[in-house]
Image (spheres, rainbow, N blue to C red):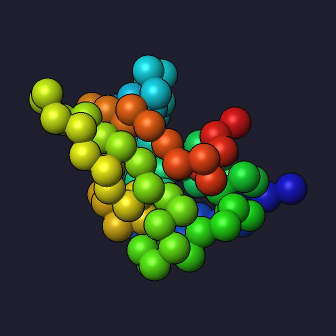
Amino acid sequence: MLNFEDIKDAFEPFERLVEIEIEGEKRQVPENNSLLRCFQYLSIETVSYGDFCWNGDCLNCKVSIKKEDKQKDVISCRTKVEENMKIVKLSDEIKLS
C-alpha cells in the first residue's frame, strides 16, 4: 500500500494546504501543485495506479472548473491548483476515495 512518503518527491514543494471544492465537497490539498497531483494527495492508491500519462496527451484527467458564472474544461495535469477553486465535474478516470 502506498503512502505519501513513498511518492512525496513527485510533488512540487509546498508549505501549506489550500482549500478547494470538488463536486460540492471542501477538501485540503497542497499548494503549488497540479490538480492531478492534488487528486493523488487525496487518493494515493487510485490516482497513482490510474490510467494517466501525466503530460496532457491522454486527456484522462480532464475536469470542469467553475469560475464566477463560467464553466471551463481543463486538463488537471497541466492546471495549477488555486485556493477556493471549484471543480464541478471529474473525469470518470479520476477516482477519489
Of the pair 93 and 27, the residue shown nearer to us:
93
Side of 2 where 76 appears, left or right: left
Side of 6 where 22 appears, left or right: left
Work out which quarter of the rendered image holds the N terminus and state it.
bottom right
Residue 42 location in percent, x, y?
59, 43
User: Does residue 81 appear in this view?
Assistant: yes
Q: Residue at x 69, y 36 (%)?
A: 97
Of the pair 20 and 68, the residue shown nearer to us:
68
Instruction: Please determine whether, in this image, residue 90 is positioned above or below residue 68.
Output: below
Question: Which residue is outermost to the left?
Answer: 68
Report the number of numbered marks.
Answer: 0
Question: Which residue is outermost to the right?
Answer: 1
Q: Residue at x 74, y 64 (%)?
A: 49
User: Does residue 16 appear in this view?
Assistant: no
Residue 40 location in percent, x, y?
59, 54
Of the pair 50 and 12, the residue shown nearer to us:
50
Q: Quadrant of residue 55?
A: bottom left
Residue 87 location in percent, x, y?
37, 36
Q: Residue at x 39, y 32 (%)?
A: 88
Residue 15 location in percent, x, y?
37, 51
Q: Residue at x 32, y 56 (%)?
A: 74
